[in-house]
């Protein structure tokens, strides 16, 4: 078990907190501040405990010097100040005297945010990736700025960067923040220690993205429902005609082998909502075989019924990947159907991991119907694959 905030003494200490403030910004305006809000419990706790709070985060990617103007954390500092109702000192540097002095001048209970950690990926227009390749000197330097390290950025937990792994390896004490603690508890409950029946639902565009998840969940779940674009590679493996649907030719054999070894655990759709091209116009419907000129963009009504039946009585549901092109008005029914079935479950533990599936559930109005929607798309996907998350692994154990 990883140390949590409650396991360490943070009072009067300079606490370095890696947060995930990677929010969408359009023309200098934050269009969705959920990630900032999600970090508030940790920040407020540290303020209450009289810590000197030093926050940092990445924002998007920095590929050249010119990116930096648009990728500053300054608007985030302003937003945070508003949400905390408290002054946030912003330093537009990632290292150096000004940053060091500002940290030294912090009083107990004060909050400072420094500039986008990925500014360290480009120096004088040269791509150096000090942050993203976990440059040793940078991790050491950042660690030297505080007394202890709190990782509360779940969204980058699957990355080995200077701002998580680098700092944690060079500081005397580390723990996870409240947000990461909750993510780990929920994922452990939904993936590692599920109550049975445990039904996994896997969808999305590509088989190749989800092989690891299928692999890991085959040993844990009672049923694996497969939908979305990736289902067509499985149909092809069964010898069905899939028309113009998405298909990864080089994964057909693999799909076949999964169907064989799953012993009926894998359940595929039985019909599709199709269109003659990738566009949002009214659907045609097809059974297991699609006409030559059609592509499958969603599961069909019989599949929705089948999946809803399978989900009845589930005690644990883990979902990764939408059932169709939910972004299209005419092809969101499959994803809605699955949301609906999950919403109707009583006493079940229901979990979503995966950026697009989380976005779909929220966009379609089912946010409050799940026990947990993970905030980390890539990180939750890797957790579902049974992989170790380096940003968590490096944190001290209790
Ligand atoms: P997640 O982020 O939840 O892991 P993915 O990124 O794997 O999910 O997949 C999401 C994408 O898959 C969505 O943008 C959706 O439009 C697309 N998709 C789902 N079904 C199909 C389909 N039948 N054909 C093409 N794209 C699909
Ligand atoms: Mg995705």
Image: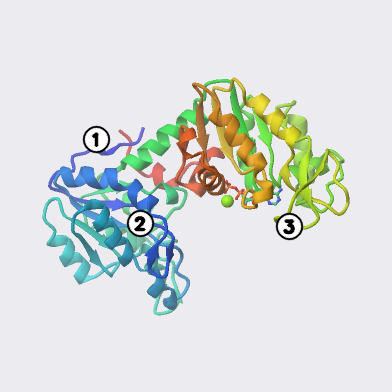
Secondary structure at numbered mark 2:
helix
Query: Which residue is most to the front?
Result: 282
- What percent of the width, then of the height, locates residue 159? 46, 52
Front residue of 381/83: it is 83
**Residue drawn 60% across the image and 30% down it:** 341
N-terminal label among 3 and 2: 2
Left or right: 357 with respect to 207? left
Of tags 3 and 2, which is closer to the observer?
A: 3
In front of the other: 200 or 394: 200
Residue 190 visible in the displayed image: yes
Q: Secondary structure at mark 3?
A: loop
Residue 79 at x, y = what percent? 30, 59
Earlier in the chain: of badge 1 and badge 3, it is: 1
Residue 228 drawn at (x, y percent): 69, 44
- Distance from disc 1 to disc 3, alpha carbons, whole Å, reads 51 Å
Residue 163 has which mark? Answer: 2
Q: Residue at x 75, y 40 (%)?
A: 255
**Residue 278, label in figure:** 3
Q: Quadrant of the N terminus?
A: top left
Circles 1, 2 touching at the beta carbon (< 8 Å): no
* Residue 339 rendering spot, x and y as whole percentages: 58, 36
- Which residue is at 28% across, 43% downward? 41
Residue behind label 3 places its C-beta within 8 angstroms of ligand 1: yes
Q: Are marks 1 and 3 in contact (CB under 8 Å)?
A: no
The residue labelled by disc 1 is 6
Q: Residues within 10 Å of mark 1 (few under 14, many from 20)?
A: few
- Mark 2 neighbour class, 10 Å CA radius: few under 14, some 14 to 19, many 20 or more: many
Which marked residue is nearer to the observer: mark 1 or mark 3? 3
Q: Earlier in the sequence, mark 1 or mark 2?
A: 1
103 up-or-down from 153: above or below? below
Q: Secondary structure at mark 1?
A: helix
């Amino acid at each position: 078990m990883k140390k949590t905030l409650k396991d360490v003494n943070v009072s009067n200490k300079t606490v370095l907190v890696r947060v995930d403030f990677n929010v969408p910004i359009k023309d200098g305006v934050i269009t969705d501040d959920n990630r900032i809000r999600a970090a508030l419990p940790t920040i407020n706790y540290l303020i209450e405990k009289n810590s000197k709070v030093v926050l940092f985060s990445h924002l998007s990617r920095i590929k050249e010097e010119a990116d930096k103007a648009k990728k500053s954390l300054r608007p985030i500092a302003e937003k945070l100040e508003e949400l905390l109702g408290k002054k946030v000192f912003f330093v537009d540097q990632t290292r150096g005297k000004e940053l060091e002095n500002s940290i030294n001048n912090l009083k107990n209970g004060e909050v400072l945010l420094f500039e986008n950690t990925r500014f360290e990926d480009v120096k004088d227009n040269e791509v150096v990736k000090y942050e993203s390749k976990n440059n040793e000197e940078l991790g050491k330097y950042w660690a030297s700025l505080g007394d202890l390290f709190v990782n509360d950025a779940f969204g980058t937990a699957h990355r080995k960067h200077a701002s998580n792994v680098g700092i944690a390896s060079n500081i005397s004490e580390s723990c996870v923040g409240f947000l990461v603690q909750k993510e780990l508890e929920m994922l452990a409950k939904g993936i590692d220690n599920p109550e049975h029946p445990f039904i996994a639902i896997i969808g999305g565009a590509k088989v190749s993205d989800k092989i690891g998840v299928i692999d890991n969940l085959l040993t844990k779940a009672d049923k694996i429902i497969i939908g979305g674009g990736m289902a067509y590679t499985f149909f092809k493996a069964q010898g069905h005609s899939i028309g113009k649907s998405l298909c990864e030719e080089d994964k057909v054999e693999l799909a076949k082998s999964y169907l064989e070894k799953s012993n009926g655990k894998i359940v595929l759709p039985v019909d599709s909502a199709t269109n003659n091209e990738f566009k949002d116009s009214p659907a045609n419907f097809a059974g297991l075989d699609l006409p030559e000129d059609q592509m499958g963009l969603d599961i069909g009504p019989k599949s929705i019924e089948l999946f809803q039946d399978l989900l009845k009585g589930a005690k644990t549901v883990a979902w990764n990947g939408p059932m169709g092109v939910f972004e299209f008005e005419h092809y969101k029914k499959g994803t809605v159907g699955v949301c609906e079935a999950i919403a109707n479950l009583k006493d079940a533990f229901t979990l979503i991991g995966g950026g697009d599936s989380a976005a779909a559930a929220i966009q379609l109005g089912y946010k409050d119907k799940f026990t947990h929607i993970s905030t980390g798309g890539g990180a939750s996907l890797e957790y579902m694959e049974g992989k170790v998350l380096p940003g968590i692994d490096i944190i001290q154990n209790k």
